[in-house]
Image (tube, rainbow, N blue to C red):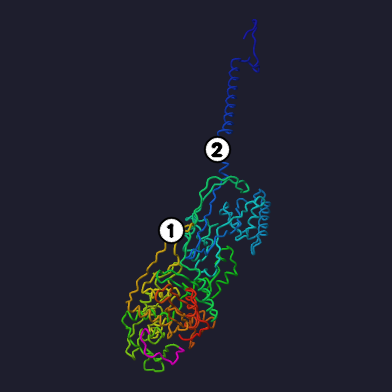
Amino acid sequence: MTFGGFDVRRRSTQAPPPDRQGGALRLLAMAVAFSLAMATLGVRLYDLQTRFQAESAQQVTRASVKERAIPALRGLIYDRNGEAVVRNAPLYQIAIVPAELPDPDNAIQRRMDRNDIYNRLAEIIAQPGLTAGDIFTKVFRQSSVAPYRGVVVAENVPRETALYLQELSLTMPGVYAQSVGSRYYPYRDLLGNILGYIGKIPAGNDDEYRKDGYDPGTDRVGLAGVEYVGEDAMRGVKGAESVLEDASGEVIQRYGSTPPRDGNGVRLTIDLRLQKIMSDALKTGMDKVKSPRGAAVAMDPSTGEVLGMIGFPGFDNNIFTRGNVTQAELDTLYNDQHRPLLNKATDDTVPPGSTFKIITAAALLEEGEVTANTVIYDPGVFKVKSEIDPENLRAAKDFYCWIGLQGGLHGPQRVSDALRNSCNTYFRKAVGGYKEEGIQGMGPDKLAAWAKVFGIGDPESRLELSRVRGFAPTAAWKRSTYGEVWTVGDSYNVAIGQGYLVATPLEMANMMAAIANGGTLYKPQIIRDIVDPQGNVITPYQPKVARQIPIKPENMKLIQNALVSVVGPDGTAKSSQIPNFVYAGKTGTAEFCDDIAQKTGVCYFGMKVQPSHAWFVAYAPADKPKIALSVYVWNGGQGSSVAAPIAQRIIAEYFGLPLPKNQEIVKTE
């Protein structure tokens, strides 16, 4: 490079002169980039403030909106005349949601805050046995499984306590008071075994019930009696609502809701007035002989409806609805050897004694073993030779007609006489045979078949609340069960309702109802109708016939007339007549020596004269029966002097009839 004729050299570190055109381009690029960045930021800010504002608000709302189930009221239970026998009553609980408990970062502080809540809760609730440690254990177990699901820490909390804790929700986060549907049973043990009770969903069945829409934490279900069998009808359908809650759980806004549909009601066949009459009469009769156990059943012979059903000892079903039944209460129920939770009317299986002779008579007549005029002589006592050693007279056994018979014998008896006098000898010889008089005997198998025809141990005559209970033995049964052959003595026992044969008071009442109506065996029913919450019948009652008993009209009439004579001036129940009123009946005195009697010293092995249950079955009036009845008193003694007067009082009060005063009780069979 030259300048003025001289060579000029530029040093390498010297910057070149500025390029004005290139700099301008760079400045323009920077300006454009800055503008684009500002524009993008502006658009984003606009989006956040406008377009996404609604969506953000919805997200906040969704986080605070909760779906709440609206419980449906459980349907009520009524007697046949429409009187409610249960009431719906709220049960208050205290629950904790583990995820909503104080959760500071400091683990020690977290433990202290939560322990403070547990201690305050235990102090405020003040239930026996409920400690802060118990609450901690329940919450800890739930927190690892379902932290957002409430865990109930206290049941049956007084309403005032529940409201007070609800007021403390801001200072005790995670703690909630809630109410669940429960029941109150005003009639207690009068209807305890019939109504049953509701309670928590049984442990281990949560998943099964959840499939049907139940909430195991709050819902109560029928666990026994009518509450159990009528669960589907009475439970109702829950509603639902959406609510917006603040941080404390208080509802600040309600959205749409679906109302619940309350459960339907169940109307029973039970007549509450008759139920009270039966309870008073049975308890009074039991107290007179100091019996701890007994039952009575009344039925409508024309429909199979159970009009009344009572058993002692019973139980107060309210203790199971509270949610915190005590161990002492459970011990009282479970340790009582007479089993209060057992429905004595439907599930107590005992020998029916001479009341079973009605079935024996029907079987003998229909099988042609005897006729109306067949005479069998009763000498009062007769001997039967040993089947193993017939030549050994010392091995022969004496069979008495029945202890206490005046004069020692009934003499010649027809079947109608044998029913009126309750002659054991007649039925023993006719069923088991008596070679000395050339009587072959019908045998046990035919008698067992007829027992089932009359509903003893028959599934077709089972009540909704019970299982099949009665049983009539056969020769094959004894061989397979005990490995022993059937003996004449076994036939003698079963012929008069003793030995291996057992029945329930319900079965005997149903048998008597079939005799009363002329041979129709109904399936016993205790649920009459299903009604909606307004009382309209939606599922009407329909009588259900188990079978027509194949008995000839003349034989049925013979038995009916004989049963009327039982309560006549010459019958075993003559002391239980009602002035100017004719009804039919049959006494029964059933010897026994069960495990309870042995434990309590009532009887022992080898006892010459064993204790006996008192029985009586009846229907009234004799010409147009409206009620069939059975009465049983455990270890009550003679049916004529204990069970028959109970039935007499029930019938008289039910029909509004006067009873004779200071009547003499004549002890017979």
Residue 5 in the image, given as x and y percentages of width and height: 64, 5
Q: In which quarter of the image is the C terminus?
A: bottom left
Residue shown at 37% from the left, 94% from the top: 391
Residue at the far front: name it.
Answer: 580
Q: Nearer the viewer, residue 187 or 247?
A: 187
The residue at which mark 2 appears reads as 55
Q: Can residue 118 be seen in this view?
A: yes
Within the magenta stretch, is there residue 414?
yes
Is residue 383 something one can see in this rendering?
A: no
Tell which tag, 1 or 2, sits nearer the viewer: 1
Q: What residue type is labelled 2?
A: Glu
> Could you tell me which residue is drawn at 41 percent across and 94 percent down?
394
In the rendered structure, the answer to whether residue 277 lies left or right of residue 163 reads left
| Inter-mark Cα distance, 1 to 2 | 49 Å
Pointer 1: residues within 10 angstroms few (<14), some, or many (20+)? few
- Magenta residues? 403-416
Pick whichever, 343 or 550, lies toward us.
550
